[in-house]
Image (cartoon, coloured by chain):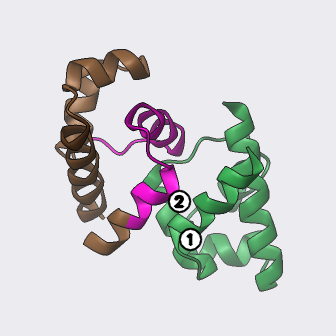
Chain colours: A green, B brown
Amino acid sequence: MSDLNDALGRVFRELRERRGVSQEALALECELHRTYVGQIERGLKSPTVRTLFVIAKGLGVAPSEILRRVEKEL
Amino acid sequence: MSDLNDALGRVFRELRERRGVSQEALALECELHRTYVGQIERGLKSPTVRTLFVIAKGLGVAPSEILRRVEKEL
């Protein structure tokens, strides 16, 4: 299941880069630590569903849409 | 955001009951503790995305579909 964290991290990074915001800016908007955002993007952390909702809001994407993309990668 | 855990718990419970399985049976299938499944259904625990995927598999529903239902409740 570390495949899951990897896929989730890739999807987060892709959406963030598409939006043209840095990890720092996203972290600030989400009130998360920049290091934590970086760890999630690298698949090193397993975020809670709550954190998924927070980041999804920061990215302007529905949480369900993020998981739809993750499912395609698994 | 405890609304989120409440909504997630309600969706899990509804899908489990629709499937006609007990918390015990679902917990066994998911290799989770029955108490933990009960706490999630009551909105007392904030599961990780990984746990969401594990329970979704046990329920035979896509994780993205679970979040789609949660989003409608928020």
Closer-to-camera residue (B66/B47): B66
Residue A34 in magenta stretch: no
Residue count near mark 2 (Cα–Cα under 10 Å), binned few <14, some 14–19, many ≥20 = many
Q: Disc 1 to disc 2, how far (Cα)?
A: 6 Å
Asked if marks 1 and 2 touch (Cβ < 8 Å), the reply is yes
**What predominant SS class does the magenta segment belong to?**
helix
Residue A14 visible (yes or no): yes
Horizontal side of residue B20 vs B63, given as left or right: left
Which segment did they paint magenta? B45-68
The reply to whether label 1 and label 2 mark residues of one chain is yes
Write the residue at 21% across / 35% down.
B39
Closer-to-camera residue (B3/B31): B31
Residue A39 rendering spot, x and y as whole percentages: 73, 48
Q: Chain of mark 1?
A: A
Residue A32 in which image quadrant = bottom right
The amino acid type of the residue labelled 2 equals Leu
Asked which secondary structure carries label 2, the reply is helix
Q: Residue furthest front?
A: B19
Closer-to-camera residue (A45/B27): B27
Q: Chain of mark 2?
A: A
Identify the residue under disc 1.
Answer: A56
Closer-to-camera residue (B74/B11): B11
Write the residue at 53% across / 74% down.
A62
Q: Is residue B66 above or below residue A22?
A: above
Residue A52: image tag: 2
Residue A18 rendering spot, x and y as whole percentages: 81, 80
Write the residue at 51% across / 40% down.
B53
Asked which secondary structure carries label 1, the reply is helix
Residue A17 rendering spot, x and y as whole percentages: 83, 76
